[in-house]
Image (cartoon, rainbow, N blue to C red):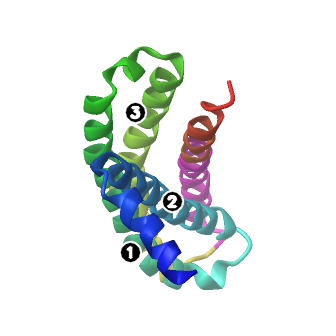
């Protein structure tokens, strides 16, 4: 049984295309998981203010995971496109790339604007202060764009085989 299972993986991963597709999917799962946790933390801060310092430290680590996942997605995606360039002309692929662009630029805003402000506010988190209220609104909008964008891309990938 175990040797059959190992043989299945050996056969599957002997083809570079299958290995790269697996890496592409694994990077997507890592990035989406980190995005979901990070963006959920930003939205939960309104209700769990005492966790702000912990969330601020976790956000930096999770942000790194998102960018690593995005980099792996980019490199593996280039390889996958090179193997099947006809996919570029499909509306699923084009829709996915528009969403990827939105998520990418939104991620830059989250990384360069939201995370540093969050780190500065985290130690003295006062939910009644104007600065925190403005931050929650600002961060909430970009976190919502991020989480909806990433999950929409993920569902588009799987919907492609059924439409």
* Residue, disc 1: 61
- In magenta, the rendered stretch is 127-149
* Residue, disc 2: 29
- Residue 119 pos. (x, y %): 41, 73
Most frequent secondary structure within the magenta stretch: helix
In the depicted view, which residue is nearer to us: 153 or 78? 78
Mark 1 vs mark 2, CA separation in Å: 16 Å
- Residue 48 relative to residue 156: left or right: right
- Residue 106 pos. (x, y %): 43, 42
- Residue 82 relative to residue 9: left or right: left
* Residue, disc 3: 101
Asked where in the image residue 40 lies, by quadrant, the reply is bottom right
Identify whether 53 is placed above or below 154. below
Q: Earlier in the sequence, mark 2 or mark 3?
A: 2
* Mark 2 Cα shell of 10 Å, populated few (<14), some (14-19), many (≥20): some
In the depicted view, which residue is nearer to us: 86 or 110? 86
In the depicted view, which residue is nearer to us: 107 or 3? 3
- Residue 30 relative to residue 64: left or right: right
């Amino acid at each position: 049984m175990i040797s059959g299972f190992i043989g299945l993986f050996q056969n599957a991963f002997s083809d570079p295309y299958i290995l790269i597709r697996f890496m592409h999917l694994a990077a997507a799962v890592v990035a989406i998981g980190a995005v979901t946790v990070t963006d959920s933390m930003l939205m939960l801060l309104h209700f769990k203010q005492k966790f702000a310092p912990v969330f601020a430290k976790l956000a930096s680590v999770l942000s790194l995971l998102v960018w690593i996942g995005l980099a792996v997605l980019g490199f593996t995606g280039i390889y996958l496109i090179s193997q099947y360039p006809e996919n570029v002309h499909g509306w699923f692929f084009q829709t996915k790339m528009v969403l990827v662009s939105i998520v990418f630029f939104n991620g830059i805003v989250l990384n360069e604007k939201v995370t540093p402000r969050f780190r500065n506010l985290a130690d003295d988190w006062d939910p009644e202060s104007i600065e925190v209220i403005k931050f929650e609104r600002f961060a909430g909008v970009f976190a919502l764009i991020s989480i909806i964008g990433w999950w929409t891309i993920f569902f588009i990938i799987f919907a492609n085989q059924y439409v």
